Amino acid sequence: MHAINFKKYIFQLSLFLFSIIFSFEKNIDNENCLLCHGLPMLSVQNEEGEFRSFEVQSDHYSNSIHRNISCRDCHESINTFPHEQNIEPVNCAKSCHITRPFEMKIFSHKNQEKQHKISDHGFNPKHTIKENAEKPSCKYCHSNKVFDDIEIFNENETSHCANCHTGESLNNVINHIDFHISHRSSENSTEIVELCSSCHDNNSKMIQFDISTSQVEGFNHHFHGKAMRRGLNEVANCADCHSSHLILSKTDPNSSIHEDNILQTCSSNSSCHQNPTLEFSKSAVHSQPTSDNNPLIFYIEWGFILLTAGVMALLFAHILMDVGRYLFDKFNGKNNE
C-alpha cells in the first residue's frame, strides 16, 4: 500500500481554493449588470426630453482603475430591477470593498474627500449656488482612466528593479511601485496643466471668484511652462505645488504655497529643486512681468530678446554679404586664380 502524500494533496487543494477565490474577485459583473448596460447606445429620456447615456463598455470597464470593484459596491442604492427613477449619486468617499496588496486595509477616498471639502474647490456657504456649482467635483478631474499595463510596466521601466529589490519583501516592492504610479505615472504633467487650465483660463468662470486668468499665461511664460512644452514631463505641474486636493490660498497657513511652507514644497519631490534658498522659493512662477509690476525683469527680458535678434540679424547679414561677394567674384572670373 502506497503512503498517501498529504503535502501534495494539501498543495493541490490550496491551489484549487485560491483559483476559486481569485476568479470570484475578478468577477466584477457578478450580477450581470452589463447584460443591459453593455448594450450600445443605451439611454433614457428624462422629463426635459434630454437623453442620458447609460452604456458601459465592458472592455473599458474591465481595464479601468475601478476594474476590481463590482457595480453595486458603488451603486449601493440600486436594490430593485427595473431600477427606481431617483437613484442616489455615487459617494466617492465611501470605503471600497478592496484592500491594498498584502496590507489587509480597506481602501477609501475619505481623506481626499475631507481635503477637497475644506479646500477652495469645496462648498463654501458664502458663495452662491451657481458659484458652488462651477467648482470642480470628483468626476470633473477624475475620469476613471483606463489602465494600459503595457505602457506603464514596460521593459525599460522595470528591467532594473531586480538590481535593488533582490531579497526585499514583496510588500515593499508593491508599495514602491504603487507610489510611483499614483504620483507621476497616472497622469503626465501636460494633462494636469490642461485640466486645471480648462477652468483657470476661462474668464467667465474665474471672474465670479475674483481670480485672474493671467495665472495660466504666467505659468506658460515661466520656466516650468516652457520646459513642459519642450517635453520635460518631470517639471513641476499644478498639483506638485498646490497639492491635488487640499488646494488653499497662499494666505492660509495650511496651504502648500504659504510663505512658511513654500520652501518645503519646492524641494518635496526628487525631480524638483534640491536645497533651494528661501529667496529662490519666493520667486514668482505665475506673474507676467510688465513695466509696472516688475520693471527690472521686464526690461532685462526684452534686452535679451533685442540682443539675440540683433546678433542673429548681423550674422545673417554677414552670411548674405559673404555669399554675394562669392557670386560677384565668380561672375567676374576672379575665382579662377
Image: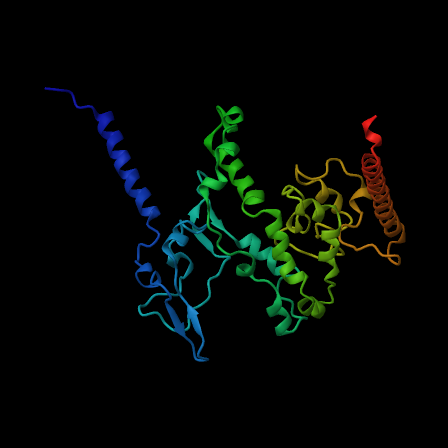
Query: Quick check: 11 above or below 81?
Result: above
- The answer to whether 40 appears left or right of 318 in the picture is left
Q: Residue furthest bottom?
A: 48
Q: Residue visible at 31% across and 68% down?
A: 81
- As rendered, which of 56 and 251 lies closer to the eye? 56
- The answer to whether 117 appears left or right of 255 in the picture is left
Query: x, y (%) of residue 194?
Result: 62, 55
Q: Residue visible at 44% across and 51% down?
A: 64
- Where, by quadrant of the figure, is residue 234 drawn? top right
- As rendered, which of 307 and 329 lies closer to the eye? 329
What quarter of the picture does the N terminus occupy?
Answer: top left
How many numbered dots are placed on residues in this image?
Answer: 0
- The answer to whether 64 appears left or right of 316 in the picture is left
Q: Residue visible at 31% across and 54% down?
A: 30
Query: Quick check: 140 above or below 152?
Result: below
Query: x, y (%) of residue 57?
Result: 38, 57
Residue 249: tell me if it is visible.
no
What quarter of the picture does the C terminus occupy?
Answer: top right
- As rendered, which of 13 and 223 lies closer to the eye? 223
Q: Residue visible at 39% across and 69% down?
A: 43
Query: x, y (%) of residue 36?
Result: 32, 63
Query: Quick check: 52 above or below 189?
Result: below
Residue 57: tell me if it is visible.
yes
Figure colour scheme:
rainbow
Q: Residue furthest front?
A: 333
Query: x, y (%) of residue 99?
Result: 44, 45
